[in-house]
Amino acid sequence: MAPQSVYIHIPFCTNKCYYCDFNSFVTNNPQLIWDYLDALESEMELTFAKWPVQQVKTIFVGGGTPTFLDQAQMKRFLEMVQKHLGAFAAPDLEFSMEANPGTTDKDKLRLMRDMGVNRLSFGVQSFDSALLKRLGRIHDVEQVYQSIDNAVSVGFDNLTIDLMFGLPDQTMDIFRDTLHKAFQLPTTHFSAYSLKVEENTLFHTLYQKDQLPLPSEETELDMYLLLIEEMERHGYLQYEISNFAKPGFESRHNKTYWLNEEYYGLGAGAHGYVNQERHVNAGPLAVYLQKCKEGLPRVEQFRVEEKEAMEDHMIMGLRLREGVDAQRFERRFGKPLREQFGAIIEEEVAKGMLEWKDGGVRLTRQALPLGNEVFARFLGE
Ligand SMILES: C[S@+](CC[C@H](N)C(=O)[O-])C[C@H]1O[C@@H](n2cnc3c(N)ncnc32)[C@H](O)[C@@H]1O
Ligand SMILES: C[S@@+](CC[C@H](N)C(=O)[O-])C[C@H]1O[C@@H](n2cnc3c(N)ncnc32)[C@H](O)[C@@H]1O
Ligand code: SF4
């Protein structure tokens, strides 16, 4: 069965945020973007010729900052998506695009909506202007409201917001205020991540010099618990460690990943999972562009053997609040979940980290902040 989800990466940003190590580049050369779009189209052609699309249920355009594209570039990009995927779109296609406050005028948003985008993911991070500056974001709080107003006014009704916590000098009160402001907005979904200090970022340099005043681990945990409590109180159900949705508005694209299903991955640095093989594309722009002239832009590709697929299945699936469904596991691998992982599961159940519920196994509430420790148990056994 061909993948039913497509990820497309747009690796450009106005500025590099101080904490970010995602594959993104700052450029003021429009030609580079046009060249990138040509390369992307050649990757699409080769990919879909080799592994033909049957039906597409989700498309996710991420970055970088997809809305960094100007009106003409956005039009070219969306026409390309239409040309290669339009005929295969499921009637209830979820078509998400990341949008950064400060890069979303009404005309661009209207074009996006007219060309089929039906879900926007706003990178807001915080409703505290000082903190936004501290993060190196290009927008202030006013621009968040403006962007969301623009989106609603051109007809978007499925909006998600990314937030971050555990940020330098962020107090519980600042975070509580951010949540309070977030709940005033017409959103169906939130993602909230605790800051990870990544190598090769300004934050990492500051951290090493002891100049990054992060909240204590205890405060960070309190923020996470506050997040869960407040989301629930406002009707957003926690369906994954970092994700919350009004009922029916879970991200179907991201569920592809958590359910360990296959997806096409296109663009610089994108990863994909097609025909039982995982692959990673070249990240640096020059390499990606060059490789696309010669064929597929992949730098890594490997077949996922059954044992690894089972481990992935656990590690990804346990992120979901519904957990890993035992029947689904058995249907996919022809082997009962208890037979493959029973011993580890029972040990973790005894420790209070996992629990059986509705025919599946999932993290207990107390294990939610400690997921990584549990996931590690399923690796390389
Ligand atoms: C971690 S955020 C979550 C998005 C948002 N919170 C939502 O649910 O709509 C998504 C980011 O992960 C990265 N990403 C997702 N899928 C990817 C893929 N297949 N290949 C490469 N990067 C990917 C991209 O950088 C993208 O901006
Ligand atoms: C790759 S970004 C793309 C979204 C978009 N470019 C933006 O920043 O508005 C996806 C999300 O990952 C989160 N993120 C990025 N770097 C992070 C880090 N070092 N620690 C925690 N979350 C991070 C942010 O919430 C961000 O919105
Ligand atoms: S806008 Fe998003 S992708 Fe770009 S540098 Fe900032 S966090 Fe990273």
Image (cartoon, rainbow, N blue to C red):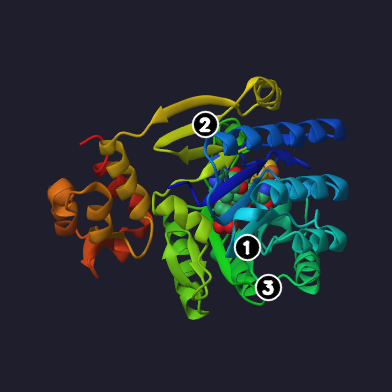
Considering the image in quadrants, where does the C terminus appear?
A: top left
Residue at point 52%, 56% (across, down):
253
- Mark 1 close to ligand 1, CB under 8 Å: no
Q: In which quarter of the image is residue 43?
A: top right
- Residue 356: image location, x then y, percent: 21, 65
Amino acid found under the numbered disc labelled 3: Asp
For the residues labelled 2 and 1, the Cα–Cα distance comes to 27 Å
Above or below, 264 relative to 221: above
- Residue 84: image location, x then y, percent: 67, 46
| In the foreground, 317 or 181 | 317
**Residue 161: mark in rendering:** 1
Residue at point 64%, 38% (across, down):
44
Check disc 3 and report the residue beneath it: 157
Report helix, strand or loop for mark 2.
strand
Report helix, strand or loop for mark 3.
loop
Above or below, 240 relative to 340: below
Amino acid found under the numbered disc labelled 1: Ile
Q: Quadrant of residue 148?
A: bottom right
- Residue 254: image location, x then y, percent: 50, 55
Residue at point 74%, 45% (across, down):
80
Q: Point out the frontmost of discs 2 and 1.
A: 2
Horizontal side of residue 13 vs 366, given as left or right: right
Above or below, 289 relative to 255: above
Above or below, 296 relative to 144: above
- Residue 228: image location, x then y, percent: 45, 69
Check disc 2 and report the residue beneath it: 280
* Residue 17 visible, this orientation: no
Q: Quadrant of residue 202?
A: top right
